[in-house]
Image (tube, helix red, strand yellow):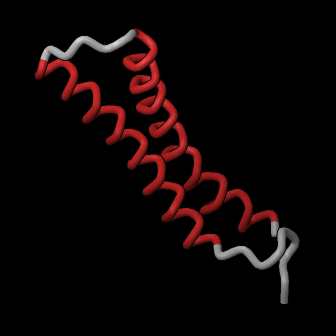
Amino acid sequence: MAGRYGDLDYPKITKRGVLFGLGLFLIGAVGEAYIHTTGAQVPGWEEQLLLDLEFLGTAIALVTPFVFGIFLPLTE
């Protein structure tokens, strides 16, 4: 029987969302660490992009469990 929001698998979505957020964070953190350890000269927009990936990854990893693990299953 389909729920209010369709046939969503909340545990699977929650796990994948957290892993996606952690992946974005790791890409940004490893990229910044590589730039600083090698002393590479990169444009400012690339450093800003890596920083944005870190912030976005952290936000996704923290918000996804609340939305798909707690809020949506309770409202169904």
Quadrant (top left/top right/bottom left/bottom right) for the N terminus: bottom right
Examine the rendered structure and indicate whether residue 70 appears above or below residue 42. below
Q: Where is residue 58 in the image (x, y as percent from the top left)?
A: 45, 37
Q: Quadrant of the C terminus?
A: bottom right
Residue found at x 41% / y 31%:
54
x and y, in percent, of residue 43 in the image: 37, 11
In the image, 42: left or right of 44? Answer: left
Q: In this view, does 1 lie to the left or right of 34?
A: right
- From the viewer's side, name the closer residue of 26 and 68: 26
Name the residue located 60 percent from the left edge and 62 percent from the top edge: 69
Asked if 27 appears above or below 49 in the picture, the reply is: below
Single out the residue that lies furthest toward the bottom: 1
57 relative to 25 in the view: left or right: right
Q: Give how far across and how far down residue 40 sits, in percent.
A: 19, 16
Residue 34 lies left or right of residue 66; in this view the side is left
Q: At 41% from the left edge and 23% from the top edge, which residue is drawn?
A: 51
Along the line of sight, which residue is nearer the eye, 57 or 64?
A: 57
Relative to 49, is 71 above or below?
A: below
How many numbered marks have been drawn onto this rendered protein structure? 0
Q: In this view, does 13 lie above or below 41?
A: below
Write down the quadrant of residue 6 in the picture. bottom right
Q: Give the residue drawn at x 51%, y 63%.
A: 16
